[in-house]
């Protein structure tokens, strides 16, 4: 009996200098994908990803770099195991665009351009303000939500942004407002309230100016050609049409990523998950969300071989 597989993709924060280099060094497919993606947005991805530089930390460059490496990992797996199909696709924040691409609803070169612009739209929305994000560790969701609601009632701009796992929720908003709440979160029981090194406030109302230009660009690039449904970060539900993708990915800019809830929702329907791209971010989260959901990862040629042996044989 064939396994039902969720193919999953991490978001911003999973990047690292040198990611994807093993693919590039050992695969003509990877070299070609680097070249075509670079030509589209005028970026030397080898320089961007393989060499120490400031751009890799800039949202407009981080996002296409992550997506490109993820799509190379996915392409190499698809070539190696053509009979293995996804039951569904799921991403965390930016990773939902990789999920959309893996589903077949957008070409990877178009997706590279799309998320390059998405990053620029997000940064532009935050350029004139001091926005940021804060990780809250060791506090339940309801308590974090209450602190945010009370702060909003006092005129502060803070919102829950990423539901990663029990006891780990990232909030977004104005940096000064976030900093002012550090002790409040700790008084409520948080073990840590840590401002993150980010200049954008993802998944909150601050990004509303980015919604219209993102939707307009998606409208030109996304199709109805889904090989399997994608799970929405916003609703935790499946979608498989262009119209739904445009609405849900536009909404994702200003609404929280419900990753934890999504994994709980899909766990009964899949036997195994495969994380594509650099690192094991989602593999670690999945282990703590639904420990019974086995998660494999493909981040280089060696891990690709391991997954091939387990899944394709």
Image: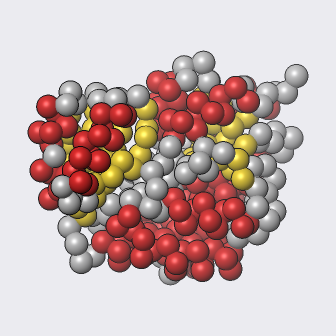
For the C terminus, the quadrant is top right
Residue at 81% from the left image edge and 42% from the top image edge: 85
Q: Is residue 75 left or right of residue 252?
A: right
In front: 282, or 137? Answer: 137
Residue 59 image offset from top left, x and y in percent: 38, 66
Q: Is residue 128 left or right of residue 62?
A: left
Q: Is residue 299 left or right of residue 177?
A: right
Residue 185 image offset from top left, x and y in percent: 19, 37
Task: Please name the colour scheme applied to the rendered image.
Answer: secondary structure
Residue 9 image offset from top left, x and y in percent: 57, 47
For the N terminus, the quadrant is top right
In front: 32, or 99? Answer: 99
Q: How many marks?
A: 0
**Where is residue 191, by image quadrant?**
top left
Residue 251 image offset from top left, x and y in percent: 53, 62
Q: Is residue 199 left or right of residue 229?
A: left
Residue at 54% from the left image edge and 36% from the top image edge: 261
Instruction: Give the vertical position of 28 relative to 120 (above or below).
Output: above
Instruction: Give the vertical position of 2 relative to 216 (above or below).
Output: above
Residue at 85% from the left image edge and 27% from the top image edge: 2
Residue at 55% from the left image edge and 51% from the top image edge: 234
In front: 64, or 310? Answer: 64
Residue 243 visible within the image:
yes
Residue 302 visible within the image:
no
Extreme residue toward the front, this view: 153
């Amino acid at each position: 009996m064939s396994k039902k597989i969720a193919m999953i993709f991490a978001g911003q924060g999973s990047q690292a200098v040198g990611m994807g280099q093993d693919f590039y060094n050992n695969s003509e497919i990877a070299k070609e994908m680097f070249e075509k993606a670079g030509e589209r947005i005028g970026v030397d991805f080898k320089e961007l990803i393989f060499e120490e530089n400031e751009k890799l930390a800039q949202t407009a460059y981080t996002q296409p770099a992550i997506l490109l490496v993820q799509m190379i990992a996915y392409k190499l797996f698809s070539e190696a195991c053509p009979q293995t199909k996804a039951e569904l696709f799921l991403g965390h924040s930016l990773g939902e665009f990789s999920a959309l691409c893996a589903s077949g609803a957008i070409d990877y070169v178009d997706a590279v351009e799309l998320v390059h612009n998405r990053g620029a739209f997000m940064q532009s929305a935050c350029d004139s303000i001091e926005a940021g994000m804060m990780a809250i560790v060791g506090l339940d969701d309801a308590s974090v939500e209450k602190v945010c609601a009370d702060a909003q009632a006092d005129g502060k701009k803070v919102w829950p942004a990423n539901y990663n796992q029990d006891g780990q929720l990232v909030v977004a908003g104005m940096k000064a407002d976030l900093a002012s709440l550090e002790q409040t979160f700790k008084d409520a029981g948080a073990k840590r309230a840590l401002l993150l090194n980010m200049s954008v406030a993802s998944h909150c109302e601050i990004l509303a100016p980015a919604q219209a230009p993102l939707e307009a660009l998606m409208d030109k690039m996304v199709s109805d050609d889904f090989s399997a449904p994608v799970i929405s970060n916003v609703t935790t539900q499946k979608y498989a049409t262009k119209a739904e993708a445009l609405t849900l990915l536009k909404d994702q800019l200003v609404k929280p990523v419900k990753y934890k809830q999504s994994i709980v929702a899909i766990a009964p329907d899949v036997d195994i998950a495969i994380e594509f791209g650099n690192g094991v971010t989602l593999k670690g989260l999945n282990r703590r969300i639904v420990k019974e959901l086995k998660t494999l990862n493909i981040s280089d040629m060696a891990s690709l071989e391991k997954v091939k042996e387990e899944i394709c044989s």
